[in-house]
Image (tube, rainbow, N blue to C red):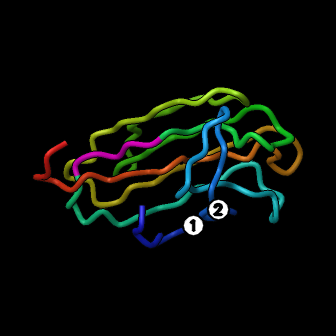
Amino acid sequence: MVLPPINCYCDLSRAKVAIAGKTYQNSLVTGDVYCKSGGGIEFNLSKEWSKLTTTVGIEDSSKGRSGSVTVYGDDHELSRQNVTLGDSVPISVDVTGVLRLRIAYTSDGYCGQALIAVGDPVLTRAGSAP
């Protein structure tokens, strides 16, 4: 995902991550710099995209063990996934006609020690072949 965020209520960075033993090169991962256990990031899709696919989970080096990831399109919940250390959850959501995409997260432990990872998110442009 190369879109710049328009809002970030978070401590997220782009990085290479490992989720359940698999490496994802271009991902988003939370940190605990600001001592938060939740947050989110928002993107302007301009109603130009049709699908978001990604894999979510807890980064393998995390101290914490669980959390959740919720994807919203124009403030409507599109997907909510509970995640635990050692597991990965594939997500594929229809974002056709969505102006604003928000990915929100919560994590357990003191200062959000479960590092939530969004592995290699990909947007498919509306009208493209899958």
Tag 2 near tag 1, CB within 8 Å: yes
Q: Which residue is mark 1?
A: 8
User: Helix or strand or loop: what does disc 2 sit on?
Assistant: strand
Which residue is located at x 16 percent, y 53 percent?
126
Does the stretch in magenta take in 53?
yes
Q: Quadrant of residue 82?
A: top right
Q: Is residue 110 above or below residue 36?
A: above
Amino acid identity at mark 2: Leu
Amino acid identity at mark 1: Cys
Which residue is located at x 55 percent, y 55 percent?
25
Q: Is residue 86 above or below residue 56?
A: above
Q: Can you give x and y, in whole percent of width and height, for residue 94 in the image?
A: 27, 40
User: Helix or strand or loop: what does disc 1 sit on?
Assistant: strand
- Of residue 29 and residue 120, the one placed in the foreground of this image is 120
Q: Is residue 17 above or below residue 68?
A: below
Q: Can you give x and y, in whole percent of width and height, for residue 47 in the image?
A: 21, 60
Question: Mark on residue 12?
Answer: 2
Bounds of the magenta span? 50-54
Placement of the C terminus among the 4 image quadrants: top left
Residue that lies at the very extreme toward the left in this rendered image: 127
Viewer-nearest of discs 2 and 1: 2
Q: Can you give x and y, in whole percent of width and height, for residue 112 in the image?
A: 80, 48
- Of residue 95 and residue 2, the one placed in the foreground of this image is 2
Q: Quadrant of residue 3?
A: bottom left
Question: Mark on residue 31?
Answer: none
